[in-house]
């Protein structure tokens, strides 16, 4: 009897379990039946090209190659070098290892003519503190180095004195010890009362450049900031001038001190006057945390996201990218940053090289540090500070992310995950379109979808977002946007002549941003010319109206024949169309060319009478055209910042020889940028909107017609095909199994249009 009851309970439990399972399954099916599966990672359509391993001739060094060069250099006992990150300035230090680019002629012979692959080599930069100079070596062949060659004189035609070097981490370590011993420890009362500095609280240092006023100087004004979020906008009113010219830190001195707008010749002079109460004191008050970027709302939302209904339309293999009709090789230099090589459209080379060269800022201030400041970011390393990009913020969530490796001021090569991103981007506007109203009702258009390669470099206070954009019209754009924190100074009498107040006792200092790009265009080959085009009004007789004249715009074309003619200064009127052109013509008999369209000029350049100007002489020109030379590789250098009065690279010398640029391999050096007068809305952070510049390279008679007409993105609708997918893939987007929930495509634009036939 008991056994029968147990069987009955088990039976009903099983029945109940089955019923609950069925109900749960019905609920789950109902919940998820409307959800489409995720889009496939596999592309629906084949790539238009094939990946090419020859792109590796431009590839950045691998972790293994960096290590092999480092070990080779350490084995050269006669060099007596260290790789310790806190090597003292008085010792020899291996500062940098980077790719040594092949000669252009050798690379083209390999890429185009099937000649031998250029020898892969690296550049190694050594600071010889013991001897008082800097040397650059070419090390090769990789991956197993067997030789090193001193190329310093070959590259720069001069010796490089040790004080031209950037400040290393090792030197910073000694400098901070010096400040603690010779400055902070001697002003403990002042530090506590004015800035709440003690054993647990401290100030942060922000150095200004250049380091002095004449060649050979190495004296740096250091401003002190509160140890808070966005320290760059928390100046405290204390600055100190440190002479660290000697590689022996025992000879370093403090030359001047600025406290609350008052100058003192020594730390002791400030201490004595402070203790006597004969200075205007700063009394510590806790600062509001206005520099924090933490969101001030709890209602966080996710914005629109990209998705790929038929898989990604681009492909990356090693350092080679394929996208629609485009292909290119890419890299990231520790010094100059992002660059691409062998850029081809429909398998024809458009660019041999497109690269960032320099980012420079010139500041104004009544305070000594910011008043003299001219930052050259290549001297610090633009690509050096390309850190990991934040998925979904710095780049679209579904972008491809690429890891890079660098060796600069470090004991070993360093890995930077996701420091480059590549993605296809719908710009949210048509590339072209037309709605035909009157006689022939139709709509034709194409979305502006382009490939973006991006890195973001956070160099001190500023973050620069670098984009190379490849459009389906055959255009390429190089542009930069600035964000991050402004540099600021403590408010003093006269400060408002140099900017606007942005916080309590804080001045946002006005400054210019100058950005230089190298554009090595090969337009239908390497024999090119430089042309300008514009218009003028001409008083013209009207053929059908004898005796009547009208001012009619006419085309004005000119060819510039020498480098000096083609050096277009920032303060002169420039023709609005600038072209690198080929002697070859398109179907209509016009020279095939690419137009350089520069947007947002930086404004006033430092007067050429100033001794520092030669180090930034590239900024004299909106555009300068030179004959391509392997020894004119860059417009600036690692050393220009710290020997600004005797620059290692003076770009103006590229133009002084005034060579012919007719039927030559030409390089365009393009300067863009903007003037930034900081304002309250730069707190806490400068936004990218409106803060940028760049250059657009546009085909001009290069093709016989707009090449985007052959794009698969084209849409065509007529009154009989408003819902057809045949010439409009967008109409079927809502039917894609991996699409998000979308409203069905509909188009009623032809309803109610004005039709001439209705008037007849």
Image: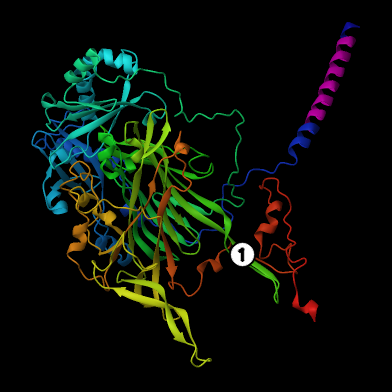
- Which residues, given as a range, are shown in magenta? 4-25
Looking at the picture, how far across and down is residue 371, in whole percent? Answer: 27, 39
Residue 202 in the figure: left or right of residue 179: right
Looking at the picture, how far across and down is residue 476, in whole percent? Answer: 43, 59
Looking at the picture, how far across and down is residue 491, in whole percent? Answer: 35, 31
Colouring method of the image: rainbow
Residue 738 inside the magenta-drawn segment? no
Quarter of the image where one finds residue 110: bottom left
Looking at the picture, how far across and down is residue 655, in whole percent? Answer: 21, 62
Q: Is residue 334 above or below residue 157?
A: above
- Most distant residue in the bottom direction: 546
Please tell me how many numbered marks the rendered image carries: 1
**Predominant SS of the magenta segment:** helix
The answer to whether any part of residue 696 appears in the image is: yes
Residue 185 in the figure: left or right of residue 686: left
- Residue at 91% in and 6% down: 1
Residue 11 inside the magenta-drawn segment? yes
In what quadrant of the picture does the C terminus appear?
Answer: bottom right
Quarter of the image where one finds residue 128: top left
Q: Residues within 10 Å of mark 1 (few under 14, many from 20)?
A: some
- Residue at 11% in and 28% down: 248
- Residue at 77% in and 67% down: 752
Quarter of the image where one finds residue 416: top left
The answer to whether any part of residue 84 appears in the image is: no
Residue 484 in the figure: left or right of residue 126: right
Q: Which residue is mark 1?
A: 445
Between 85 and 479, the one lying in front of the other is: 479
Residue 532 in the figure: left or right of residue 160: right
Between 384 and 363, the one lying in front of the other is: 363
Q: Secondary structure at mark 1?
A: strand
Q: Is residue 468 above or below residue 292?
A: below
């Amino acid at each position: 009897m008991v056994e029968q009851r147990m069987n009955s309970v088990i039976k009903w439990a099983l029945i109940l379990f089955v019923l609950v399972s069925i109900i749960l399954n019905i609920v789950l099916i109902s919940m998820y039946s409307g959800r489409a599966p995720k889009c496939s990672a596999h592309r629906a359509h084949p790539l238009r090209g094939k990946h090419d391993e020859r792109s590796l001739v431009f590839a950045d060094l691998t972790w293994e190659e960096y290590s092999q060069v480092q070990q080779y250099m350490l084995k050269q006992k006669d060099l007596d070098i260290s790789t310790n990150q806190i090597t003292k300035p008085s010792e020899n230090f291996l500062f940098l290892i980077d790719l040594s680019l092949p000669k252009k002629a050798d690379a083209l012979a390999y890429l185009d003519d099937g000649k031998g692959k250029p020898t892969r080599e690296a550049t190694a930069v050594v600071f010889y503190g013991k001897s008082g100079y800097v040397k650059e070596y070419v090390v090769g062949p990789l991956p197993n180095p067997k030789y090193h060659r001193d190329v310093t004189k070959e590259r720069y035609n001069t010796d490089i004195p040790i004080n031209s070097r950037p400040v290393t981490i090792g030197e910073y370590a000694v400098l901070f010890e010096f400040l603690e011993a010779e400055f902070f420890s001697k002003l403990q009362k002042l530090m506590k009362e004015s800035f709440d500095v003690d054993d647990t609280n401290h100030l942060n240092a922000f150095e200004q450049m250049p380091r002095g006023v004449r060649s050979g100087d190495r004296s740096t004004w250091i401003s002190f900031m509160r140890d808070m979020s966005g320290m760059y906008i928390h100046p405290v009113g204390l600055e100190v001038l440190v002479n660290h010219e000697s590689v022996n830190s025992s000879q370093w001195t403090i030359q001047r001190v600025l406290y609350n707008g008052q100058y003192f010749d020594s730390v002791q002079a400030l201490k004595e006057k402070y203790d006597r109460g004969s200075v205007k004191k700063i009394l510590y008050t806790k600062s509001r945390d206005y520099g924090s970027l933490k969101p001030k709302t709890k209602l966080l939302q996710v914005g629109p996201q990209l998705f790929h209904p038929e898989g990604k339309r681009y492909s990356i293999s090693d350092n080679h990218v394929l996208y629609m009709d485009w292909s290119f090789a890419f890299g990231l230099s520790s010094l100059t940053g992002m660059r691409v090589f062998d850029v081809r459209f429909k398998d024809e080379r458009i660019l041999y090289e497109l690269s960032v060269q320099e980012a420079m800022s010139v500041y104004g201030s009544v305070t000594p540090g910011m008043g003299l400041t001219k930052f050259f970011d290549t001297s610090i390393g633009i690509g050096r500070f390309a850190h990991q990009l934040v998925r979904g913020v710095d780049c679209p969530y579904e972008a491809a992310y690429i890891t890079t490796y660098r060796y600069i001021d470090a004991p070993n090569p360093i890995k930077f995950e996701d420091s480059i991103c590549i993605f296809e981007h719908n710009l949210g506007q048509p590339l072209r379109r037309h709605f035909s109203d009157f006689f022939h009702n139709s709509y034709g258009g194409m979305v502006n979808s382009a490939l973006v390669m991006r890195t973001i470099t956070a160099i001190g206070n500023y973050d620069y977002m670098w984009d190379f954009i490849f459009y389906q019209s055959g255009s390429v754009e190089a542009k930069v946007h600035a964000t991050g924190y402004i540099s600021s100074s403590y408010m003093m009498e006269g400060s408002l002549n140099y900017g606007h107040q942005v916080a309590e006792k804080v001045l946002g200092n006005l400054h210019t941003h100058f950005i230089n790009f190298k554009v090595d265009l090969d337009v239908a080959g390497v024999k090119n010319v430089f042309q300008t085009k514009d218009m003028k009004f001409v008083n013209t007789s009207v053929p059908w109206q004898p005796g009547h004249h009208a001012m009619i715009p006419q085309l004005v074309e000119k060819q510039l024949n020498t480098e000096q003619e083609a050096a277009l200064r920032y303060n002169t009127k420039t023709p609005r169309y600038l072209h690198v052109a080929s002697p070859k013509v398109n179907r209509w008999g016009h020279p095939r060319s690419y137009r350089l369209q520069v947007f947002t000029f930086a404004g006033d350049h430092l007067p050429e009478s100033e001794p520092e100007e030669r180090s930034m002489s590239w900024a004299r020109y909106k555009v300068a055209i030179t004959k391509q030379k392997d020894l004119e590789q860059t417009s600036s250098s690692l050393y220009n910042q710290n020997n600004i009065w005797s620059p290692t690279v003076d770009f103006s010398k590229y133009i002084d020889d005034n060579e012919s640029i007719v039927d030559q391999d030409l390089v365009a050096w393009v300067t863009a940028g903007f003037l930034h007068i900081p304002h309250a809305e730069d707190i806490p952070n400068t936004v990218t909107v409106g803060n940028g510049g760049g250059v657009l390279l546009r085909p001009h008679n290069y093709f016989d017609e707009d090449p985007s007409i052959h794009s698969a993105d084209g849409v065509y609708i007529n009154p009989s095909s408003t819902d057809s997918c045949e010439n409009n893939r967008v109409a079927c987007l809502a039917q894609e199994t991996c699409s998000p929930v979308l409203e069905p495509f509909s188009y009623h634009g032809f309803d109610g249009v004005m039709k001439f036939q209705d008037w007849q």
